[in-house]
Image (spheres, grey):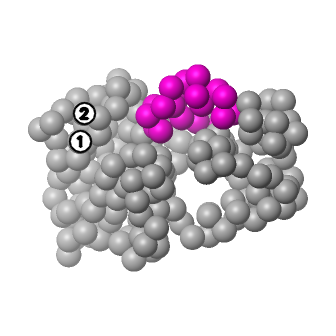
């Protein structure tokens, strides 16, 4: 059965925001000859392959420079399961089934996310009475996922200086002065954000 697995982008500006994985071997990389082309400098020309058969799904790194990660652990080869976070270089995805997510909100500016995760994040923002612009909210989500300012800039295709200005405004709105203070703010009282492990 085809398209039992879908990769959902974790980065709002990445296109395609969802990529169905067909049965067989899918080559992932920066080269135009790959089945799934990811035009990002942290992704190798032939980065990894995903093998889907009747009974299983597996990802295998193809000797990439920046690595393939599954739930923040660098792997050489590993089975895939729904809900896992799969990352090629600095480009991250969530492994899903086609019907597990709400795709109605899919757009070029806001990639689909799990409904529960969005609700938790919204509750965390409301609980702390934080008012942010849509752009600042996107940056905040990525900061809480553990991305550096440089990685956020690359994912959103904006300058590092713009991201830094957003971060400064986020700190001001949240009443904090550093990333650790920001994480502590969202972790306490069950804020819904997870401390990054990378």
Q: Residues within 10 Å of mark 1 (few under 14, many from 20)?
A: some
Picture layout, residue 64 above or below residue 123:
above
Distance from disc 1 to disc 2, alpha carbons, whole Å, reads 5 Å
- Foreground pick, 41 / 61: 41
Magenta extent? 146-167
Quarter of the image that includes the C terminus: top right
Which residue is at a point 20% across and 51% down the rendered structure image? Answer: 26
**Is residue 135 rendered to the left or right of residue 156?**
right
**Is residue 43 rendered to the left or right of residue 34?**
right
Picture layout, residue 25 above or below residue 65:
below
- Foreground pick, 128 / 75: 128
- Foreground pick, 94 / 67: 94
Q: Residues within 10 Å of mark 2 (few under 14, many from 20)?
A: many
Q: Secondary structure at mark 2?
A: loop
Picture layout, residue 69 above or below residue 54:
above
Q: Secondary structure at mark 1?
A: strand
Which numbered marker is on residue 60?
A: none
- Inspect this view and state whether residue 70 appears: no
- The residue identified by callout 2 is 30
Quarter of the image that includes the N terminus: bottom left
**Is residue 173 rendered to the left or right of residue 99?**
right
- Inspect this view and state whether residue 49 appears: yes
- Foreground pick, 163 / 85: 163
Q: Position of residue 165 (x, y in %)?
A: 66, 28
Of callouts 1 and 2, the N-terminal one: 2
Q: Quadrant of residue 28?
A: top left
Residue with the most extreme front position: 133
Which residue is at a point 39% across and 53% down the rendered structure image? Answer: 108
């Amino acid at each position: 059965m085809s398209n039992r697995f879908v990769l959902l982008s974790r980065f709002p500006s990445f296109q395609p925001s969802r990529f169905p994985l067909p049965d067989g071997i899918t080559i992932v990389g920066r080269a135009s000859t790959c089945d799934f082309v990811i035009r990002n400098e942290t992704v190798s020309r032939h980065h990894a392959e995903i093998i889907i058969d009747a009974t299983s799904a597996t990802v295998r790194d193809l000797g990439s420079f920046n690595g393939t990660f599954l739930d923040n652990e660098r792997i050489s080869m590993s089975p895939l399961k729904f809900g896992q976070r799969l990352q090629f270089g600095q480009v991250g995805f969530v492994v899903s089934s086609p019907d597990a997510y709400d795709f109605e909100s899919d757009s070029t500016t806001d990639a689909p996310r799990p409904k529960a995760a969005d609700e938790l994040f919204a509750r965390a923002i409301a609980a702390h009475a934080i008012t942010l612009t849509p752009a600042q909210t996107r940056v905040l989500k990525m900061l809480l996922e553990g991305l550096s300012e440089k990685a956020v800039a690359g994912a959103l295709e904006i300058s590092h200086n713009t991201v830094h200005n957003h971060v400064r405004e986020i700190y001001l709105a949240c009443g904090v002065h550093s990333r650790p203070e920001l994480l502590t703010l969202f972790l306490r009282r069950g804020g819904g954000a997870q401390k990054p492990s990378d």
